[in-house]
Image (cartoon, rainbow, N blue to C red):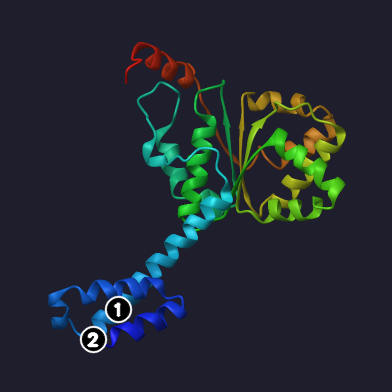
Amino acid sequence: MLHHPTLDKLQQLKLTGMRRALQDQAAMPEIAAIAFEERLGLLVDRELTERDNRRMQMRLRTAKLKQNTALEDIDFKSPRGLDRALILKLADCAWVAAHLNVLITGPTGVGKTWLACALAHKACREGYSALYARIPRLLQELDMGRADGRYAKVMRHLSKTEVLVLDDWGLATLTDQHRRDLLEILDDRYNLRATLITSQLPVTHWHEAVGDPTLADAILDRVVHNAYKINLSGNSMRKQRGKLTTENPDT
């Protein structure tokens, strides 16, 4: 009978994990045989687990990943040039702790964004913050930020995020201001945070895509030399899915 006020107090203290665990224990006939210290330990463990889960879900929501993917779901059987050993190495997130970069290149539809989101998802599960951004839209947001006063706030957020995913590098035609924006973002993160970039262009063509040789040198110097490189190949997986849908209209 004492559980009712105790449950209310746990709720007031926002110890919701302990509250639920105590309710579960009350429904277990055998719980009386367990020592008080062990029961208390179970309550505390439940609270910690639920808090960790809530923090992880918050990191995932904040990351705004384009695709909800996980490294465990990678299909290594598809002929895309995936190096299993490298993916397993990246899965431990040591590259994030070491503030390194990952560059994923390849033709459209081979899973660049999927893999980038999977790596960022794993980082969130390991306790790191992440953020997904398509470069064309990010540059538009920075343009609007200059107009409405949010520019500095957006740049601070980009600099503090532990894993920044920059998708579709090289698709947008860069203005001189955009080049300088990218340089500022990457300079703020150099050797301090991890950056993950996807592009349809081979890395050897990135210098030309930036446009200005001097700024291109400065930008790529902060990205390429301290990065793992993944070059995907093969046919578009979107076309394969479309073919399956056409061949199996009732499934």
Relative to 170, residue 239 above or below: above
Under mark 2, the amino acid is: Phe
For image coordinates 49% across by 46% down, the residue present is: 121
Q: Is residue 244 above or below residue 45?
A: above
Which quadrant would the C terminus be assigned to in this image?
top left
Residue at left offset 69%, top offset 51%: 158
Element assignment for label 1: helix
Comparing 30 with 60, the one in front is 30
Q: Position of residue 52 (x, y in %)?
A: 44, 64
**Badge 2: residue crowd in 10 Å (few <14, some 14–19, many ≥20):** few
Q: Position of residue 4 (x, y in %)?
A: 32, 83
Q: Which residue is mark 1?
A: 41
Amino acid type for the residue under numbered disc 1: Gly
Which class describes the residues within 10 Å of circle 1: few (<14), some (14-19), or many (20+)? few
Q: Is residue 99 left or right of residue 123?
A: right
> What is the C-alpha distance between the residues marked 2 and 1?
9 Å
Task: Choose between 63 and 181: the one closer to the eye.
Answer: 63
Residue at 78% of width from left, 35% of height from top? 217
Which one is earlier in the sequence, the residue at label 2 or at label 1? 2
Image quarter of residue 181: top right
Q: Residue furthest top?
A: 247
Disc 2: which residue: 36
Label 2: state its secondary structure: helix
Give how far across and how far down residue 110 sits, in percent. Answer: 50, 24
Quarter of the image where the N terminus is located: bottom left
